[in-house]
Image: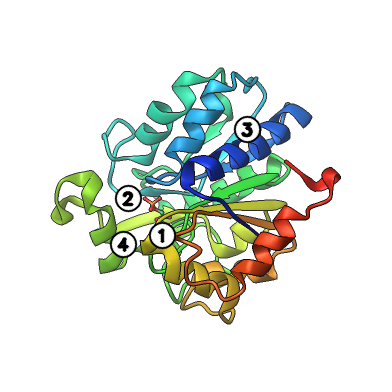
Amino acid sequence: MEIIIQANAAVANGVAARLFAKAIRRNAGAVLGLATGGTPLALYRELIAMKLDWRKIVTFNLDEYVGLAPDHSQSYHYFMWENLFRHVNIAKKNVHIPDGLAKDIPKFCAKYEKQIHAAGGIDLQLLGIGTDGHIGFNEPTSSLASRTRIKTLTPQTRKDNARFFGSEAEVPHHCITMGIGTIMEARHCVMLAFGKNKARAIAETVEGPVTSMNPASALQLHPRVTVFLDEDSASELKLSDYYRWVYDNKPDWQKF
Ligand code: PGA
């Protein structure tokens, strides 16, 4: 894993935005895996401001709440259109987000996997991380080989996300999420994690054992992962001086 620690989230988002912009400019038809939540908002704002050409870009979102219609203000459909897609020239037909209202969920999930495969797989996958180490909505003890499926959210995740809904009672119990196995097939995974409340999950992800108790730790087995952190989320890493040294001494050809 490449660990990039920046002074604050704003600087880290700037570097992450350059990485995404480079991928989009290099491949006009790139397949992007996208994430929701508080973390990617600033990155999306940066990408919008860059006025990139999204016409041929194909996207797959990680997850969606079961039971929320696309126009529900807390659905991830709504989030993506509101915070990114309506501000760029993406083609609606190229946008894929799990359907929280799917009647036959297993059938929908199998179709989603097929669509990712048919698009040629995901080139660049954006990831946040839950305070419990979830990626997508793969909660602790998720199979590290899992595919897109229905999952039950943990009480912790429902608590963490209650801030968006107004009250915990309104947070759905179930979601559809890409599996860890699905995420692991992306060619390059980029994780963003900011703030003190992510420090433990990040230390376990990067330096702990690979364990389904911290699903993000599966990324240790992925050949290409870049993790963007601020000082707070990096605060529990044992080898932070080493990661800083590596980044400061990056050869020019590796720079973003
Ligand atoms: P957050 O969520 O960006 O709102 O902290 C991250 C996640 O749950 O993956």
Nearer to me, 107 or 247: 247
The answer for how far apart the CA atoms under marks 1 and 4 are is 15 Å
Instruction: Please name the residue shown 84% across and 50% down the image.
Output: 251
The amino acid type of the residue labelled 1 equals Ile
Helix, strand, or loop for circle 2? loop
Disc 3 under 8 Å from ligand 1? The reply is no
Q: Is residue 120 left or right of residue 11?
A: right
The amino acid type of the residue labelled 3 equals Val
Label 3: how many Cα within 10 Å (few below 14, some 14–19, many 20+)? many
Q: Is residue 79 above or below residue 205?
A: above
Q: Which residue is mark 1?
A: 150
Sequence-wise, which precedes: disc 1 or disc 4? 1
Q: Quadrant of the C terminus?
A: top right
Sequence-wise, which precedes: disc 3 or disc 1? 3
Q: Is residue 14 above or below residue 94?
A: below
The answer for how far apart the CA atoms under marks 2 and 1 are is 8 Å
Q: Which residue is mark 2?
A: 66
Q: Is residue 24 left or right of residue 158?
A: right
* x and y, in percent, of residue 6 in the image: 56, 51
